Image (cartoon, rainbow, N blue to C red):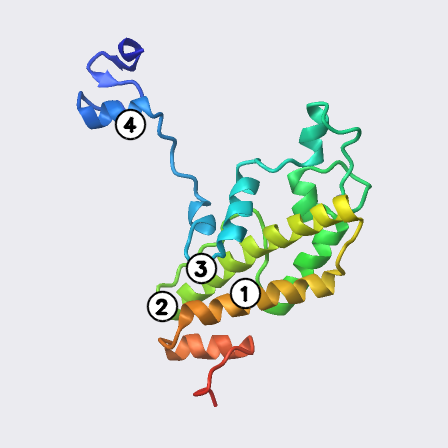
């Protein structure tokens, strides 16, 4: 195995010369860093939200399109709408139910929840807060929609989009309060007040 990894004076994966470190990196077949890693694994996201988001981004959830393909499911139709094949794209972005949830989230906070990573060019405290909040909502949507899908499949129960958005909103606001503490600068405070998040010292 090692003979195939180190050839012509460099490691096959890295094109660098011999070193134990390069050999180790080749041996463990380190993959390039995904551009969505920061969206999923940051300390503002709730761990249970991060886990489901990570599974979504790695195509690791047992959606019906996948189960059907492996012969583990009698059909591949969406557990929520029962109309279209249950792919990840359909379940989280194109299903009528999910579209309503994401649209209500966007109306409420102005964030569009999409697969593509949200990036912020600003370096101010307000820009960082906005970025973290967007990540927080992004991962919360995956978690809650997946929960609804499972509840629909197992118990035939589906929470109304308006109620689900209230739950996502409560999760997000509780998390923001716990993360931001009292170190709020003016542009953060202005932005947070638009969300109805304030403390005893708010006007
Ligand atoms: Zn559907």
Mark 4 or mark 2, which is nearer to you?
Answer: 4
Which disc number belongs to residue 84? none
Q: Is the residue under label 2 in contact with that under label 1 (CB below 8 Å)? A: no
Q: Please provide percent x and percent y for residue 122.
A: 38, 63
Judging by the rendered image, the residue that carries numbered circle 1 is 172
Percent position of residue 133, x then y: 49, 63
Ligand 1 within 8 angstroms of badge 1 C-beta? no
Q: Quadrant of residue 44?
A: bottom left
- At 51% from the left and 79% from the top, the residue drawn is 193
Kindly identify which residue carries mark 3.
44
Left of 156 or right of it: where is 22? left
Q: Residue at x 28, y 27 (%)?
A: 25
- Graded by Cα atoms within 10 Å as few (under 14), some (14 to 19) or many (20 or more), the crowding at tag 2 reads few
Above or below: residue 25 compared with residue 10? below
Whichever of labels 4 and 2 marks the residue nearer the N terminus, that label is: 4
Mark 4 Cβ inside 8 Å of ligand 1:
no
Q: Earlier in the sequence, mark 4 or mark 1?
A: 4
Q: Quadrant of the N terminus?
A: top left
**Given contact means CB atoms under 8 Å apart, are the residues at marks 3 and 4 in contact?**
no
The residue that mark 2 highlights is 124
3 and 1 marks in contact (CB < 8 Å): no
- Left or right of 58? Residue 86 is right
Query: Which residue appears at 77% of the width and 54% of the height?
Result: 158
Disc 1 residue crowd, few under 14, some 14–19, many 20+, Cα 10 Å: many
Q: Which mark's residue is nearer the viewer, 1 or 2?
A: 1
Identify the residue under disc 4. Answer: 25
CA separation in Å, label 3 and label 1: 9 Å
**Which comes sooner in the sequence, label 3 or label 1?**
3
Distance (Cα) linking label 4 and label 2: 36 Å
């Amino acid at each position: 195995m090692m003979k195939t990894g180190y050839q012509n004076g460099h490691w096959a994966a890295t094109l660098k010369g011999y070193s134990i470190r390069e050999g180790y990196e080749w041996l463990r077949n380190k993959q390039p860093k995904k551009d969505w890693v920061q969206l999923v694994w940051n300390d503002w996201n709730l761990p249970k939200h991060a886990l489901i988001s990570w599974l979504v981004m790695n195509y690791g959830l047992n959606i019906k399109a996948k189960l059907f393909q492996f012969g583990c499911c009698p059909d591949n139709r969406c557990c929520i709408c029962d109309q279209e094949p249950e792919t990840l794209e359909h379940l989280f972005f194109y299903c009528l139910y999910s579209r309503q949830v994401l649209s209500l989230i966007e109306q409420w906070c102005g964030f569009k929840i999409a697969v593509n990573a949200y990036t912020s060019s600003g370096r101010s405290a307000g820009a960082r807060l906005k970025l973290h909040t967007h990540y927080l909502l992004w991962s919360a949507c995956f978690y809650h929609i997946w929960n609804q899908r499972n509840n629909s499949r197992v118990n035939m129960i589906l929470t109304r989009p308006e109620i689900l958005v209230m739950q996502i909103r409560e999760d997000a606001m509780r998390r923001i309060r716990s993360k931001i503490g009292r170190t709020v600068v003016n542009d953060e405070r202005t932005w947070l007040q638009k969300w109805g998040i304030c403390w005893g010292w708010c006007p």
